[in-house]
Image (cartoon, rainbow, N blue to C red):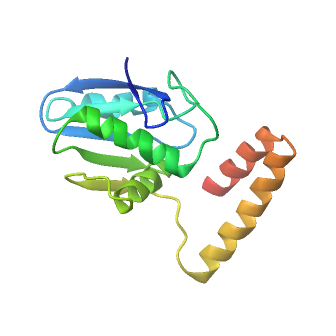
Amino acid sequence: MDRILSADGTPIAYRRQGDGPPLVLVGGALSSSAADAPLAALLAPRFTVLTYDRRGRGASGEAGRCSVAREVEDLAAVVGAAGPGASVFGMSSGGALALEAVAAGLPVELLAVYEPPYTPGASGLLFKARCTARLHRLLAAGDRSGAVELFLSMTG
Protein backbone atom coordinates (compact mmCIF):
# COMPACT_ATOMS: atom_id res chain seq x y z
CA MET A 1 0.00 0.00 0.00
CA ASP A 2 1.04 3.56 -0.63
CA ARG A 3 0.59 6.31 1.94
CA ILE A 4 -0.28 9.97 1.75
CA LEU A 5 -0.47 12.48 4.60
CA SER A 6 -3.77 14.12 5.42
CA ALA A 7 -3.87 17.83 6.28
CA ASP A 8 -3.26 17.11 9.99
CA GLY A 9 -0.33 14.78 9.26
CA THR A 10 -2.23 11.50 9.67
CA PRO A 11 -0.92 8.83 7.27
CA ILE A 12 -3.66 7.45 5.01
CA ALA A 13 -2.96 4.12 3.32
CA TYR A 14 -4.31 3.52 -0.17
CA ARG A 15 -4.05 1.12 -3.12
CA ARG A 16 -4.06 2.08 -6.77
CA GLN A 17 -4.92 -0.39 -9.52
CA GLY A 18 -6.15 -0.37 -13.07
CA ASP A 19 -5.97 1.98 -15.98
CA GLY A 20 -8.25 4.80 -17.03
CA PRO A 21 -9.93 7.80 -15.41
CA PRO A 22 -9.29 8.00 -11.65
CA LEU A 23 -12.01 6.72 -9.32
CA VAL A 24 -11.82 6.76 -5.51
CA LEU A 25 -13.92 4.23 -3.57
CA VAL A 26 -14.99 5.27 -0.06
CA GLY A 27 -16.02 2.33 2.12
CA GLY A 28 -18.42 2.18 5.03
CA ALA A 29 -17.78 2.85 8.70
CA LEU A 30 -16.62 -0.58 9.79
CA SER A 31 -14.71 -1.58 6.66
CA SER A 32 -11.19 -1.23 5.37
CA SER A 33 -9.96 -1.04 1.79
CA ALA A 34 -9.99 -4.86 1.69
CA ALA A 35 -13.81 -4.76 1.63
CA ASP A 36 -13.68 -2.68 -1.57
CA ALA A 37 -11.14 -4.98 -3.28
CA PRO A 38 -13.69 -7.09 -5.22
CA LEU A 39 -15.40 -4.00 -6.67
CA ALA A 40 -12.04 -2.39 -7.41
CA ALA A 41 -10.96 -5.49 -9.34
CA LEU A 42 -14.12 -5.33 -11.45
CA LEU A 43 -13.61 -1.64 -12.20
CA ALA A 44 -9.83 -1.76 -12.78
CA PRO A 45 -10.01 -2.63 -16.50
CA ARG A 46 -11.77 0.71 -17.16
CA PHE A 47 -10.64 2.97 -14.30
CA THR A 48 -7.61 3.72 -12.17
CA VAL A 49 -9.23 2.74 -8.88
CA LEU A 50 -8.02 3.98 -5.52
CA THR A 51 -9.24 2.26 -2.37
CA TYR A 52 -8.14 3.48 1.03
CA ASP A 53 -8.27 2.65 4.69
CA ARG A 54 -10.27 5.36 6.37
CA ARG A 55 -8.70 7.06 9.40
CA GLY A 56 -8.14 4.63 12.27
CA ARG A 57 -8.77 1.55 10.13
CA GLY A 58 -6.43 -0.95 8.50
CA ALA A 59 -3.02 0.53 7.72
CA SER A 60 -4.05 4.19 8.15
CA GLY A 61 -3.18 6.17 11.24
CA GLU A 62 -5.40 7.91 13.73
CA ALA A 63 -4.14 11.26 14.96
CA GLY A 64 -6.28 13.09 17.46
CA ARG A 65 -10.01 12.93 17.60
CA CYS A 66 -11.81 11.55 14.56
CA SER A 67 -14.37 13.88 13.00
CA VAL A 68 -16.19 14.39 9.73
CA ALA A 69 -13.93 17.37 9.00
CA ARG A 70 -10.79 15.23 9.45
CA GLU A 71 -12.23 12.47 7.25
CA VAL A 72 -13.10 15.04 4.56
CA GLU A 73 -9.44 16.12 4.67
CA ASP A 74 -8.39 12.47 4.35
CA LEU A 75 -10.63 11.97 1.32
CA ALA A 76 -9.28 15.18 -0.20
CA ALA A 77 -5.74 13.83 0.17
CA VAL A 78 -6.67 10.58 -1.59
CA VAL A 79 -8.50 12.45 -4.36
CA GLY A 80 -5.37 14.58 -4.75
CA ALA A 81 -3.28 11.42 -5.07
CA ALA A 82 -5.73 10.11 -7.68
CA GLY A 83 -5.02 13.07 -9.92
CA PRO A 84 -7.04 15.51 -12.00
CA GLY A 85 -10.55 14.53 -13.01
CA ALA A 86 -11.07 12.05 -10.15
CA SER A 87 -14.56 10.74 -9.47
CA VAL A 88 -15.76 9.36 -6.13
CA PHE A 89 -18.07 6.48 -5.22
CA GLY A 90 -19.13 6.14 -1.59
CA MET A 91 -21.10 3.34 0.05
CA SER A 92 -23.07 3.58 3.28
CA SER A 93 -21.32 6.03 5.63
CA GLY A 94 -18.68 6.41 2.91
CA GLY A 95 -21.48 7.83 0.76
CA ALA A 96 -22.36 10.31 3.48
CA LEU A 97 -18.68 11.25 3.77
CA ALA A 98 -18.41 11.73 0.00
CA LEU A 99 -21.51 13.98 0.02
CA GLU A 100 -20.07 16.03 2.90
CA ALA A 101 -16.74 16.38 1.08
CA VAL A 102 -18.32 17.61 -2.14
CA ALA A 103 -20.59 19.99 -0.19
CA ALA A 104 -17.41 21.36 1.46
CA GLY A 105 -15.93 22.07 -1.97
CA LEU A 106 -13.93 18.94 -2.84
CA PRO A 107 -13.59 19.06 -6.63
CA VAL A 108 -14.64 15.76 -8.20
CA GLU A 109 -15.59 14.94 -11.76
CA LEU A 110 -18.52 12.69 -10.83
CA LEU A 111 -20.04 11.62 -7.52
CA ALA A 112 -22.07 8.48 -6.90
CA VAL A 113 -23.34 7.17 -3.56
CA TYR A 114 -25.08 3.98 -2.51
CA GLU A 115 -27.24 3.81 0.62
CA PRO A 116 -25.93 6.83 2.53
CA PRO A 117 -27.47 6.67 6.03
CA TYR A 118 -29.91 9.55 5.82
CA THR A 119 -33.53 9.57 6.95
CA PRO A 120 -35.32 12.61 5.51
CA GLY A 121 -37.81 14.90 7.18
CA ALA A 122 -38.69 15.75 10.77
CA SER A 123 -38.88 12.11 11.85
CA GLY A 124 -35.36 11.59 10.52
CA LEU A 125 -34.04 14.55 12.52
CA LEU A 126 -35.69 13.26 15.71
CA PHE A 127 -34.32 9.76 15.13
CA LYS A 128 -30.82 11.16 14.54
CA ALA A 129 -30.99 13.29 17.69
CA ARG A 130 -32.02 10.32 19.84
CA CYS A 131 -29.33 8.06 18.37
CA THR A 132 -26.67 10.75 18.70
CA ALA A 133 -27.54 11.34 22.36
CA ARG A 134 -27.41 7.61 23.06
CA LEU A 135 -24.11 7.28 21.20
CA HIS A 136 -22.56 10.13 23.21
CA ARG A 137 -23.67 8.45 26.47
CA LEU A 138 -22.14 5.12 25.40
CA LEU A 139 -18.85 6.71 24.34
CA ALA A 140 -18.65 8.86 27.49
CA ALA A 141 -19.00 5.65 29.51
CA GLY A 142 -16.21 4.04 27.46
CA ASP A 143 -18.63 1.48 26.01
CA ARG A 144 -17.24 1.14 22.49
CA SER A 145 -18.85 -2.26 21.97
CA GLY A 146 -22.20 -0.73 22.91
CA ALA A 147 -21.59 2.04 20.37
CA VAL A 148 -20.89 -0.53 17.65
CA GLU A 149 -23.97 -2.51 18.68
CA LEU A 150 -26.07 0.67 18.39
CA PHE A 151 -24.62 1.36 14.95
CA LEU A 152 -25.33 -2.19 13.74
CA SER A 153 -28.88 -2.13 15.08
CA MET A 154 -29.53 1.11 13.14
CA THR A 155 -28.08 -0.10 9.85
CA GLY A 156 -29.80 -3.41 9.78
Q: Position of residue 22 (x, y in %)?
A: 19, 37
Residue 156 at least partly seen: no
Snapshot quadrant of residue 21: top left
Q: Residue furthest right?
A: 141
Residue 81 at least partly seen: yes
Q: Position of residue 39 (x, y in %)?
A: 32, 35
Snapshot quadrant of residue 73: top left
Residue 19 vs residue 1, the one in the foreground:
1
Query: Is residue 37 found left or right of 17 in the rendered image?
Result: right
Query: Is residue 35 found left or right of 18 in the rendered image?
Result: right
Query: Which residue is rendered at x = 64% and y = 40% of the image?
Result: 65
Query: Which residue is rendered at x = 72% and y = 62% of the image?
Result: 131
Query: Is residue 7 found left or right of 45 in the rendered image?
Result: right
Residue 152 vs residue 24, the one in the foreground:
24
Query: Which residue is rendered at x = 66% and y = 67% of the image?
Result: 128
Measured along the vertical axis of the image, is residue 100 above or below residue 55? below
Q: Residue furthest top?
A: 1
Snapshot quadrant of residue 51: top left
Q: Position of residue 19 (x, y in %)?
A: 13, 28
Measured along the vertical axis of the image, is residue 100 above or below residue 124? above
- Count of labels shown? 0
Q: Position of residue 151 (x, y in %)?
A: 67, 50
Query: Which residue is rendered at x = 24% and y = 34% of the image?
Result: 82
